[in-house]
Image (cartoon, rainbow, N blue to C red):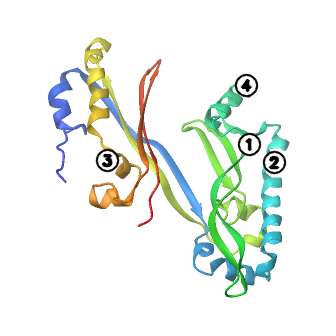
Amino acid sequence: MKKEAFSRGGLPKVFMDRFGQHVTGFISGFDRLRFRATLRPLLLPGGLEIYLYSCKVLVKDFGKFAKELTDQIRKAAYSHFEQLGLPIRYVADSSLSKEDLARELARKEAIASGPICLLACVEPCLSFQLRGDRQAKQLRLVLEHSKCTHLYHYFAHPQFGQLHVRVQTWFPFSHPLYQQITGRMQGLHYYWSASQSEYATDILFDDPKNLQPLYRQFIHHAVKTFQSPNVMRFLGNRHAETTGKVHPLFEGQVTTRLKERPEGVRLRRGVADLYRRA
């Protein structure tokens, strides 16, 4: 892949050669960061069975054991926000923006720092379910796609703005908050990783009239230049990252959404994954 030359300031040299006379400054930094905490020992083959054995819990009693932990997690979260007198909402409509709802609640409560609200909703997840293996005549714990209640703890930070912690309430729990809830989770260590990260650069032009004739050109360039492999690579698709191409079995859609807003135009890329079986 050809490396692009950058100016001393950090912007692409080809961009500065063409428009540098109108650029007065820029700022670069992480625009979005999402960290994930996973209980890796539970995700290893037989890991959950080993953990249940250490807790003296039979596999057939997994459902009861898991529900007890789930109830403790929910009770602790609800009690905390009830004691603070802060809003608790169940979000039934998946199209509703939780970010906007939390922002509106913060405005109504005049919250500039600290906890804002607790939002609960049912969302897809990977979770353990108890399944019968007829051939082996045994009960097995299977990690599969499912749905469960997720709790969104929203906070206002004086420097970073609005933040949230998304807590999965069923095995394999996704945040070390649980270590403070029940001693039965002791002995497990959480592995932290960045599941999403976005680095952005904002460029400041000297005058709106100098940017205006170029604005549509930039949008057209973004729509026309970035193709499906570029979008999939940016969103973490491994095949696109290693080969620069879309997987031959991929039958999903790569979408581009353009929306006019008062402050400008937003261009958003997305991928709906769908693969056919070979």
Q: Which residue is mark 4?
A: 108
Q: Position of residue 47 (x, y in %)?
A: 63, 79
- Name the amino acid type tagged 4: Lys
Q: Residues within 10 Å of mark 4 (few under 14, many from 20)?
A: few
Q: Work out how far the residue at label 1 is from the one at label 4, CA to CA, in angstroms.
A: 15 Å
- For image coordinates 65% across by 34% down, the residue present is 96
| Mark 3, other Cα within 10 Å: few <14 / some 14–19 / many ≥20 | some
x 47%, y 52%: residue: 273
Left or right, residue 102 beside residue 276: right
Of 264 and 253, nearer the camera is 253
The disc at residue 78 is 2
The x and y percentages for residue 178 are 72, 62
Q: Nearer the viewer, residue 72 or 158?
A: 72
Helix, strand or loop under label 3: helix
- Tag 1 secondary structure: strand
List the residue tagged with mark 1: 118
Query: Are discs 3 and 4 less than 8 Å apart at CB?
Result: no
